[in-house]
């Protein structure tokens, strides 16, 4: 199930959302153009759980700063496209609801929460986490609260057939977070094997749910 657009037009131009997509894309291009070992960049600027909690690191920047550098790094084109697709679909409405400044602060705070959710559930891991998915998960949490009934155009794969359906956001995002939680539970004990930081997604999502009311420009505008 892959969402690709919503029926929920924003009233303001999403400057920050576009800037975030551009920044993430630029960083990945820089990564791909790096002539050395790609792993050197990831281990230098990715968020390493053990380092985030102990501040013990050989990285060139303080571990706390890697929370922010890791947010703009990705493991490849598919990783970037999937995160930016979700950001484009859902981010413009959250930016519209919060305003540009509140939105970027909200986005970054959700990313911070996601990094530490992953670190706290994988405290001994030395595997760096990269990607915008934790921050984007916060956007999804906010969207679920603000626009639960907005219709999301979604690709459904039925064997060799692909069907486009319009589903309520509460169903699309609800299904997504259930998958993150289940995969997170199944992945416990595999912290040092790499893979997807499922609990970063869960942590970012919960942060979005909790923070959105504090950041709203109009406190009365809670549900779509």
Image (tube, rainbow, N blue to C red):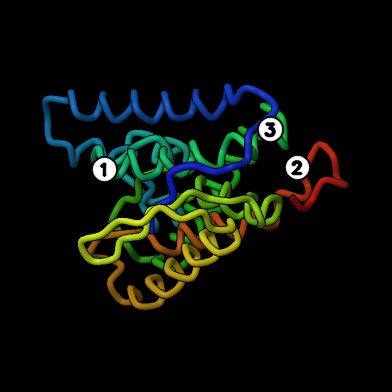
Number of callouts in the render? Answer: 3
Sooner in the amino-acid sequence: mark 1 or mark 3: 1
Quadrant, the N terminus: bottom left
Q: Distance between the residues labelled 3 and 2?
A: 12 Å
Please give the name of the residue rendered at 35% of the width and 76% of the height, measured from the top-left corner. 188
Compared across the picture, whether 167 is left or right of 100 comes to left
Q: Position of residue 10 (x, y in %)?
A: 65, 32
Please give the name of the residue rendered at 78% of the width and 47% of the height, measured from the top-left corner. 214
Residue extending farthest to the right is 220
Please give the name of the residue rendered at 51% of the width and 52% of the height, measured from the top-left corner. 137
Labelled pair 1, 3 in contact (Cβ < 8 Å) = no
Question: Which image quadrant for residue 91?
Answer: top right
Question: Which image quadrant for residue 27?
Answer: top left
Check disc 1: other Cα within 10 Å, few if <14, some if 14-19, many if 20+. Answer: few
Q: Distance between the residues labelled 1 and 2?
A: 31 Å
Name the residue tied to disc 2: 215
Q: Which of marks 1 and 2 is in front?
A: 1
Q: What element carries label 3?
A: helix
Q: What element carries label 1?
A: helix
Labelled pair 3, 2 in contact (Cβ < 8 Å) = no
Labelled pair 1, 2 in contact (Cβ < 8 Å) = no
**Disc number at residue 78?**
1
Q: Is residue 61 above or below residue 177?
A: above
Q: Is residue 183 above or below residue 8?
A: below
Sooner in the amino-acid sequence: mark 1 or mark 2: 1
Check disc 2: other Cα within 10 Å, few if <14, some if 14-19, many if 20+. Answer: some
Name the residue tied to disc 3: 96
């Amino acid at each position: 199930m892959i969402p690709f657009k919503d029926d929920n037009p924003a009233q303001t131009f999403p400057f920050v959302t576009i800037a975030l997509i551009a920044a993430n894309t630029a960083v990945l291009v820089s990564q791909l153009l790096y002539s050395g070992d790609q792993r050197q960049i990831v281990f230098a600027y990715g968020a390493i759980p053990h380092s985030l909690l102990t501040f013990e690191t050989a990285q060139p920047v303080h571990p706390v700063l890697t929370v922010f550098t890791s947010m703009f790094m990705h493991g490849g084109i598919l990783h970037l496209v999937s995160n930016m697709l979700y950001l484009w679909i859902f981010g413009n409405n959250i930016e519209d609801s919060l305003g540009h400044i509140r939105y970027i602060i909200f986005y970054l705070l959700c990313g911070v929460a996601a990094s530490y959710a992953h670190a706290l559930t994988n405290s001994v891991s030395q595997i760096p986490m990269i990607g915008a998915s934790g921050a984007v998960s916060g956007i999804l949490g906010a969207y679920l609260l603000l626009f639960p009934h907005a219709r999301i155009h979604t690709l459904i794969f039925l064997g060799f057939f692909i069907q486009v359906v319009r589903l309520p956001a509460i169903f699309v995002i609800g299904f997504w977070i259930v998958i993150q939680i289940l995969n997170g539970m199944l992945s416990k004990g595999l912290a040092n094997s790499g893979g997807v930081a499922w609990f970063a997604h869960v942590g970012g999502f919960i942060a979005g749910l909790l923070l959105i009311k504090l950041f709203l420009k109009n406190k009365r505008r809670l549900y779509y």
